[in-house]
């Protein structure tokens, strides 16, 4: 694509990116550990962390016993969960998701009509996971982001499949992208890494992103990752002060420190906020078997060259990602040519949350063509709560949904 495209692209004037980072909620800054509960404090939290009464109720709930709660999640014994499942999480439930995120989920179905899509929510997580697979105070966690991290490691360890964050557009078949290699045993998992924040000692590929993960069930790496994360958040409600935890000691966090320096004005402490990344890094750095599995059998995809390529190209040309996405210049399609998936951080999608569905789906814009592609297959089942998309001609090789394939929102 010509570099000068960015200089004469049609722009929009009312889409200034937000300076927030969390897809699910801004981080909350309060930790509770063991018998000694620290003073309730913090700002910018979620799930009531700014409300003293809500905090007290959460703390009270932490120490209530739950007798006679089944230890086996009911969905795990019905045989209904297939390995070809795309997992996601929205704490309040699919119906409360912004339209932009619902349309992102819609791209998963169109690209993969023979896969199941399950968007879990807080009140139904225990239908799929037992209490011992999650941090011991999962239900009282203030940060939806941290809760989401626990859920993804839990469901992938037990059921396998693919995890996607709801702020991602999928533009490819998961079978060809990663699953054929995993199901055949040629690869044990698929991940994306960010080369800007990896360490030199591990070839710059050790900053494993958590927004795209793929594995079969029972993967030793994911089981250990899940257990480390669960141990890290034992008797905790969020991430404040977690740097002092023994599991953080003795590991190279230089990539996280570069993030802190790059976004120094954000007020974020990425070493704590990205605890799931830190525990993955701990595995790779300190566990020889995990490191060998990551090095020898993980499919590792460069996120800067795929999921973040459009955004980085826009940034390098002094443009906001929203400006490129809302452009009506047909040359904008060249920017995303060959990109299998697109990941939006809050500065990228923030302005889009205020748009109505008809604006998001406007095919005169690059965003509309990404969310509602002309060549989408017409046979997939629309998500519950959404109207069926217009039937469009499938111009490429035909793909058909398997009998009973559907999206599920629990």
Image (cartoon, rainbow, N blue to C red):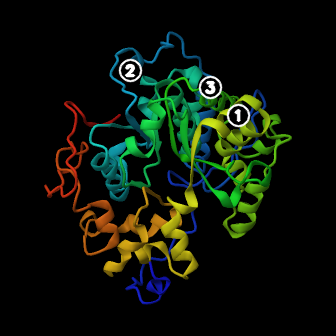
CA gap between label 2 and label 3 equals 22 Å
Earlier sequence position, callout 2 versus callout 3 = 2
- Tell me the quarter of the picture where residue 86 sits: top left
Question: Which is more foreground, mark 2 or mark 3?
Answer: 3
Query: Residue 75: which numbered mark, if any?
Result: 2
Residue that badge 3 annotates: 220
- Taking the image as shown, residue 316 lies to the left or right of residue 31, namely left
Q: Residue at horizontal 46%, vertical 84%?
A: 6
Label 2 element class: helix
- In this view of the protein, which residue sits in the foreground, 387 or 83? 83
Q: Position of residue 337 (x, y in %)?
A: 40, 66
The crowding category of the residue bearing disc 2, from other C-alpha atoms within 10 Å (few below 14, some 14 to 19, many at least 20), is few
Earlier sequence position, callout 2 versus callout 1 = 2
Relative to 8, residue 281 above or below: above
The crowding category of the residue bearing disc 3, from other C-alpha atoms within 10 Å (few below 14, some 14 to 19, many at least 20), is some
Label 3 element class: helix
Relative to 291, residue 275 above or below: below
Relative to 321, residue 376 above or below: above
Residue that badge 1 annotates: 292
Q: Is residue 328 visible?
A: no
Quadrant holding the C terminus: top left
Label 1 element class: helix
- Taking the image as shown, residue 153 lies to the left or right of residue 111, namely right
- In this view of the protein, which residue sits in the foreground, 25 or 358? 358
């Amino acid at each position: 694509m010509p570099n000068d495209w960015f200089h004469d692209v049609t722009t929009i004037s009312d889409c200034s990116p937000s300076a927030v980072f969390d897809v699910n909620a801004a981080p909350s800054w309060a930790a509770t550990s063991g018998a000694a509960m620290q003073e309730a404090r913090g700002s910018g939290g979620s799930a009531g962390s700014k409300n003293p009464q809500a905090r007290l109720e959460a703390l009270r709930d932490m120490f209530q016993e739950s007798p006679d709660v089944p230890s086996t999640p009911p969905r795990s014994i019905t045989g209904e969960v297939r390995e070809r499942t795309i997992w996601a999480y929205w704490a309040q439930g699919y119906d409360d998701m912004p339209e932009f995120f619902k349309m992102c989920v819609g791209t998963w179905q169109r690209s993969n009509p023979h896969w199941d899509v399950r968007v879990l929510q807080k009140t139904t997580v225990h239908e799929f996971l037992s209490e011992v697979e999650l941090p011991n105070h999962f239900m009282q966690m203030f940060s939806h982001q941290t809760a989401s991290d626990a859920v993804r490691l839990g469901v992938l360890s037990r059921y396998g499949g693919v995890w996607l964050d709801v702020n991602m557009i999928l533009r490819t078949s998961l079978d060809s992208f990663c699953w054929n290699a995993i199901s055949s045993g040629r690869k044990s998992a698929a991940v994306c890494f960010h080369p800007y924040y990896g360490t030199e000692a591990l070839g710059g590929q050790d900053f494993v992103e958590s927004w795209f993960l793929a594995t079969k069930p029972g993967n030793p790496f994911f089981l250990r990752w899940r257990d480390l994360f669960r141990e890290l958040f034992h008797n905790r409600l969020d991430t404040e002060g977690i740097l002092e935890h023994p599991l953080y000691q003795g590991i190279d966090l230089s990539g996280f420190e570069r993030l802190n320096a790059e976004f120094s004005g954000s007020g974020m402490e990425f070493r704590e906020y990205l605890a799931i990344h830190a525990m993955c890094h701990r595995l790779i750095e300190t566990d020889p078997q995990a490191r060998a599995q990551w090095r020898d059998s993980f499919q590792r995809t460069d996120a800067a060259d795929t999921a973040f390529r459009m955004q980085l190209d826009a940034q390098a040309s002094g443009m906001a990602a929203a400006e490129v996405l809302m452009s009506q210049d047909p040359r904008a399609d060249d920017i995303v040519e060959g990109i299998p998936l697109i990941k939006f951080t809050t500065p990228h999608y923030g302005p889009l949350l205020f748009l109505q569905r008809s604006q998001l789906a406007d095919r005169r814009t690059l965003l509309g063509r990404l969310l509602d592609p002309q060549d989408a297959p017409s046979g997939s089942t629309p998500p519950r709560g959404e109207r069926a998309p217009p039937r469009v001609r499938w111009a490429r090789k035909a793909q058909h949904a398997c009998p009973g394939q559907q999206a599920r929102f629990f």
